[in-house]
Image: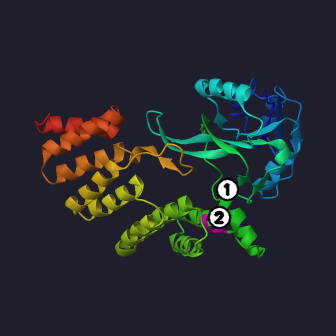
Amino acid sequence: MITISLCMIVKDEEEVIGRCLNSIKDIVDEIIIVDTGSTDNTKEIIKEYTDKVFDFKWIDDFSKARNYSFSMATKDFVLWLDADDVLLQKDRDKFKKLKQNLDNKVDAVMMKYNVGFDEGGNVTLSYFRERLSKRVNNNQWMEPVHEYLNVGGNIINSDICITHKKERKPAGGRNLLIYEKNIAKGINLTTRGLYYYARELFYNGRYDEAIIYFKRFLNTEAGWIEDNINACYNLSNCYQNKKDKKNRLNILLKSFEYDIPRPEGCCKIGDYYLDDKNYEKAIFWYKLALELEKPVDSLGFISHDYFGYIPCIQLCVCYDKLGNTKEAIKYNDKAAEYKPNDSSVVYNKSYFKSIGEE
């Protein structure tokens, strides 16, 4: 059976660090925590789980801090978690089996990362992350922010999920500030850096600048397909905020250049036509979204609600606007098959009942 070192970087995580470590402590063989400047009780709590606590002066570079934590590992494989991550019981059971049976010829294990949830706690956004890696390969973290572990060799996918249970909002503007400090120093952004810098500009409402950097990223023609597609979606949101209808639609259509249509892209085009009160065209795109199958082992971002719930609830709206109550009720009922207690589904049912249709 393999041995595992858990390596984490933390700062001011007293509210969540115990929850995280309790969910993993009986699976790993070593816990290494690198603290980047906590001023609360984080380190005191950590010491209840391990004596391998190290200080690292924060230098606006997540990769350097993570690489330092990895350098302290001594076991066969290295696992990383963030303080607000947790393993649910079913995933703990799966992880224990993986540990017992993992072939030492495997170099890295990808695990699903559940990061988005609806009002009922259902997963709405997930993607694979490089989570467990062979220590002797000395895999390195790359990028100062929105970092990734550069793994290679024999990589396998696992159905183990890490659940991200965020309890507080991230520090506003922190990532954007790191990028802009590096730009001011004359450090060139990588292709990936261009994409994530554009995203940070978008999240901070700087749409004109975001448009420039999303375009610069796409023009490199060197981006990961999934990032290319999501850059198109983000650009469409920028144009929507700027009320630029033509470019909003054109960039969504451009997303189809990179791969077969995705439900999210189809729904966004449906939203475009819905906003324009062109309900027939909106219906076409929402129905197309319903025909697309959810991928099983895709490494891209999976927005689960677009595979059923969102197109159904939007079709309900479109048919209601056209006065076709029968079809509107039909699609609200279909949406209820995915989320029976969703607030929109419940509201629609009440609405149809109020007009004597249900």
Tell me the quarter of the image containing the C terminus: top left
Secondary structure of the magenta portion, mostly?
A: helix
Q: Which mark is residue 192?
A: 2
**Quarter of the figure with residue 349:** top left
Is residue 217 rendered to the left or right of residue 25?
A: left
Vertical placement of residue 31 versus 141, above or below:
above
Give the mark toward the camera: 2 or 1.
2
**Quarter of the figure with residue 179:** bottom right
For label 2, the crowd category at 10 Å Cα-Cα, with few meaning under 14, some 14 to 19 and many 20 or more, is some
Please report the bounds of the magenta region as a residue range: 191-195
Q: Alpha-carbon distance for marks 2 and 1?
A: 9 Å
- Circle 1: residue type: His
Relative depth, front residue between 18 and 262: 262
Task: Tell me the element at label 1.
Answer: loop
Q: Where is residue 46 in the image (x, y as percent from the top left)?
A: 81, 31
Residue ID for mark 1: 146
Q: Position of residue 150 (x, y in %)?
A: 73, 54
